[in-house]
Image (spheres, rainbow, N blue to C red):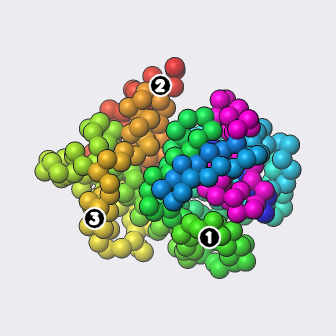
């Protein structure tokens, strides 16, 4: 299968390297020193599951010359989505399938509105990975899970084919008949810890044991769940999603900081709009109060604007 990795960060770099090692024709879209290193030295993976080198690695900053792809994995930061859509257009053929694995719950809608919803599958992943140096990907979590699904819940041949390709890498891959619920269930976790991490600027273990902070964490999760239910997703969400999310947070490695927090602490542009802003916007549209997330958004937005000017 010919596969384009639209965004060769930790997530896209790791999954793309696994796919290349499995024998697929993988084209990595990257930039700057990272692109140069991949072209010259290959893509190096350092992983708890074993390291390896993809060399030579097909890499470019302009996929126009790649030709028609079978599969595109969208793994850019959420705020890079529209820019990436323009770059990826030349590789799209009538049967090209696009799977977004980005943070947030609106990636498929945003990409589909520009490229056609018929191309899109819903997707979500659980993994800890990052670019350690140009051309070097670090992967740190024992878990590396992907869930995909047709947006209308159908069982199709293309979903089976994509599942088989991804599962062939050794990753845990599942197909869901209700991918929107999967997206919102993970979102309740990643959005809440991103908000709390960015506000407190400490690791997860340093605020989940503080009573006052823990109570606010529960309020954040409650606001996210209330928005999901108002949007019609909550019908199928687990009734104990609050406790399940808290249990996931409690069982998570306390040293881990979500990527949005790492970006904010480093003074970089973060996924503020897709992780926190969307909760505030949807809450306003549907009349759902989101006071804690409104506060988080108001506190974090000035730093976001300053980072964008650098």
Q: Nearer the viewer, mark 2 or mark 3?
A: 3
- Please tell me the numbered disc located at residue 167: 1
Q: CA distance from mark 1 to mark 2?
A: 38 Å
**Residue at the spot of label 2:** 307
**Magenta-highlighted stretch: main secondary structure?**
helix
Q: Nearer the viewer, residue 198 or 274?
A: 198
Start-end of magenta stretch = 13-41
Left or right of residue 147: residue 219: left
Contact flag, marks 1 and 3 (Cβ < 8 Å): no
Q: Quadrant of the N terminus?
A: bottom right
Q: Say whether residue 34 is magenta.
A: yes
**Which of marks 3 and 1 precedes in the sequence?**
1
* 80 lies above or below 16: above
Q: Quadrant of residue 234?
A: bottom left
Residue 257 lies, in percent from the top left, at: 36, 45
Residue 109 visible in this rendered orientation of the protein: no
Residue 228 lies, in percent from the top left, at: 41, 61
Secondary structure at badge 1 equals helix
* 165 lies above or below 79: below
Secondary structure at badge 3 equals helix
* 231 lies above or below 265: below
Residue plotted at (62% across, 52% down): 52
**Residue at the spot of label 3:** 247
Residue 221 lies, in percent from the top left, at: 30, 56
Q: Say whether residue 39 is magenta.
A: yes
């Amino acid at each position: 299968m010919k596969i384009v990795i639209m965004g060769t960060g930790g997530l896209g770099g790791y999954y793309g390297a696994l796919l290349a090692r499995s024998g697929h024709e993988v084209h990595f879209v990257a930039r700057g020193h990272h692109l140069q290193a991949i072209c010259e030295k290959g893509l190096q993976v350092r992983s708890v599951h074993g390291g390896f080198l993809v060399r030579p690695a097909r890499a470019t900053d302009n996929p126009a010359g790649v030709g028609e792809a079978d599969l595109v994995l969208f793994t850019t930061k959420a705020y890079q989505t529209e820019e990436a859509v323009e770059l990826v257009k030349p590789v799209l053929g009538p049967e090209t399938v696009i799977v977004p694995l980005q943070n947030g719950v609106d990636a498929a809608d945003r990409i589909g509105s520009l490229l056609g919803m018929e191309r899109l599958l819903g997707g979500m992943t659980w993994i800890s990975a990052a670019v350690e140096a140009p051309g070097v990907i670090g992967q740190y979590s024992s878990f590396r899970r992907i869930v995909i699904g047709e947006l209308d819940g159908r069982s199709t041949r293309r979903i089976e084919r994509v599942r088989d390709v991804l599962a062939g890498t050794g990753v845990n891959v599942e197909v869901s008949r209700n991918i929107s619920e999967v997206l919102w269930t993970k979102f309740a976790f990643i959005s809440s810890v991103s908000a709390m991490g960015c506000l407190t600027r400490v690791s997860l273990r340093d605020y989940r044991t503080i009573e006052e902070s823990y109570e606010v964490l529960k309020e954040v999760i409650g606001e996210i769940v209330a928005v999901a239910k108002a949007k019609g997703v909550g019908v199928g969400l687990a009734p104990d999603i609050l406790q399940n999310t808290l249990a996931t947070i409690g069982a998570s490695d306390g040293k881990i900081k979500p990527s949005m927090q790492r970006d904010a602490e480093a003074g970089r542009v973060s996924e503020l709009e897709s992780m926190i802003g969307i909760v505030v916007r949807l809450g306003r549209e549907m009349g759902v109060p989101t006071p804690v997330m409104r506060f988080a958004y108001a506190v974090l937005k000035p730093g976001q604007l300053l980072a964008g000017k650098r």
